[in-house]
Image (tube, rainbow, N blue to C red):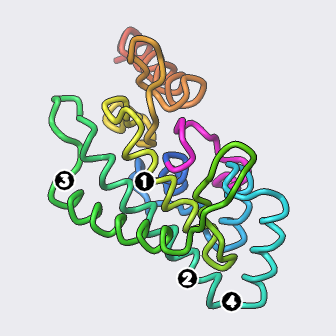
Amino acid sequence: MPLDVSELPLVGGHPVLDLVNTLERGGSSPPHDFLSDSSALLRWSSRVGVLSDAEFRQVSRVWRDEPAAAHAGLAAVRDIREGLHVVLLALTTDADGDPAGDPVAAGAALVALHERWSGAAARARFVLEPSRVRLAYGTVPAMLVPDRLAEAARDVMVTADLTRVRRCPVGEGGCGWLFLDQSRNGSRRWCRMADCGNAVKARRLTERRRAGRPSRS
């Protein structure tokens, strides 16, 4: 039975990489979407810090009273998630050193992500703080979650070291989740050693033991 979104490990190193990982992609079965509805999206957004407690209550009220707005918000977040996955996958390499994704598809995804961010920026406003002026995204409650995530997607693409984006190796038994490798020597291979890494090591050990057993006639 799949984990609830509130139990999903956060391994991406950035909220929008964790967003990408809310859709399972590594297995052969149909992918499971942890953002199954707007309620799951709200719980996840609160958990990763996209929403404060007060904003959680505010957006919950708006989406409860306007189901069409909740549907539009969820659809927008799923679009951001898919576009970012396509872009980041094109920046990673497979076991042979070839791009794991499609650069042409990534170009189209960048256009769509730019449109999402442009809409979010149009709804943003300047906020005066004690020592600075800040551009605040998410000023329209119905679009608060997708607008914040569109800005977070722009942030990771523009400011993060994308040469550090890794994919938990599906070909070696990993789950396919994306993460920023923040290890000192850039050698992290697994989303979490405690999960995929140990599972693959245990499976290989079992296979070696089986191979070493004498055959029976």
The magenta span reads: 1-16
Helix, strand or loop at disc 2?
helix
How far, Cα to Cα, is label 2 from label 4?
A: 9 Å
Q: Quadrant of residue 52?
A: bottom right
Q: Write the residue at 63% across / 67% down.
A: 138
- Main SS, magenta region, reads loop
Name the quarter where the C terminus is drawn. Answer: top left
Q: Examine the structure image and report whether residue 86 is included in the region drawn in magenta.
A: no
Q: Which mark is residue 154?
A: 1
Tell me the residue that label 4 is attached to. 67
Residue drawn at 62 percent across, 52 percent down: 133
Question: In terms of depth relative to the viewer, which is nearer, 98 or 42?
Answer: 42
User: Circle 3 sits in a helix, a strand or a loop, which is it?
Assistant: loop
Mark 2 in CB contact with mark 4 (< 8 angstroms): no
Label number found at residue 102: 3
Q: Answer with mark 4 or mark 1, whichever residue precedes in sequence.
A: 4
